[in-house]
Image (spheres, helix red, strand yellow):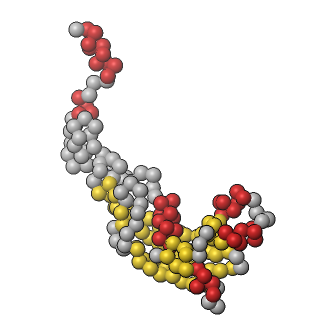
Amino acid sequence: MIINLAKLMNSNDVKHRVSFIMDKLVLPEDIKLESPLEISLDIAFDNQIITVEGDFEVHLHSNCDRCIENASFALNVTIKEKLIKQSDLCYLSNLSQETIDEEYQVLYSLDLDLTDLVTENIILNLPTKILCSEACKGICPYCGKNLNKEKCNCANEQIDPRLAILAEFKK
Ligand SMILES: [Zn+2]
Ligand SMILES: [Zn+2]
């Protein structure tokens, strides 16, 4: 979803609501959308500063980090971005480069890719671990059974590797 900011700037309104539906997202780690994502963003113009704001809930799924079965999860994402055209950067000359880098996205074109902006904000909110449930027991490293579904005895049967070396010596 690309919107042309020049068109919005030329209208008399300072605030615009843009609504769209995303049915595909490119996310890391094979994370996919569970259902189409409906988004409404408010785009406002205040002198040289353009703000894009909105919040939404996104339903995603991927593979559980522990048992590799399907894991579905929802995220609440709040978008609040301040944008400025590159040619307007002089208006921020009272700010340090560091502050500008932290707080503003510099626009090199007035065609703003909202899909990118939404995707970046979802990635920032992704959990570090994706689990089918907090209590997921994972996969047995010895026999490969999914311990949520089956039990195994491997953990009890494993000998401490240091003891195994001793056992070798005694032979
Ligand atoms: Zn799991
Ligand atoms: Zn096992």
Q: For the view shown, which residue lies furthest in the bottom direction?
A: 12
Q: Which residue is pictured at 65% across the width and 72% down the height?
A: 85
Q: For the view shown, which residue lies furthest in the right direction?
A: 94
Q: For the view shown, which residue lies furthest in the top direction?
A: 170
Q: Quadrant of residue 11?
A: bottom right
Could you tell whether 20 is left or right of 133 in the image? right
Q: Where residue 109 appears, x then y in whole percent?
A: 59, 72
Q: Which residue is pictured at 55% across the width and 70% down the height?
A: 79
Query: Can residue 66 be seen here?
Result: yes
Q: Where residue 152 appears, x then y in whole percent?
A: 21, 39
Could you tell whether 44 is left or right of 20 in the image? right
Q: Quadrant of residue 36?
A: bottom left
Q: Where residue 129 appears, x then y in whole percent?
A: 42, 51
Q: Pick the quarter of the image with the C terminus.
A: top left
Nearest the camera: 9 or 137?
9
Position of residue 39 relative to residue 71, above or below, is below
Q: Which residue is pictured at 75% across the width and 71% down the height?
A: 91
* Total residue callouts: 0
Nearest the camera: 148 or 96?
96
Could you tell whether 64 is left or right of 78 in the image? left
Position of residue 13 relative to residue 21, above or below, is below
Query: Can residue 77 be seen here?
Result: no
Q: Quadrant of residue 58?
A: bottom left
Q: Which residue is pictured at 25% across the width and 31% down the height?
A: 156
Position of residue 21 relative to residue 95, above or below, is below
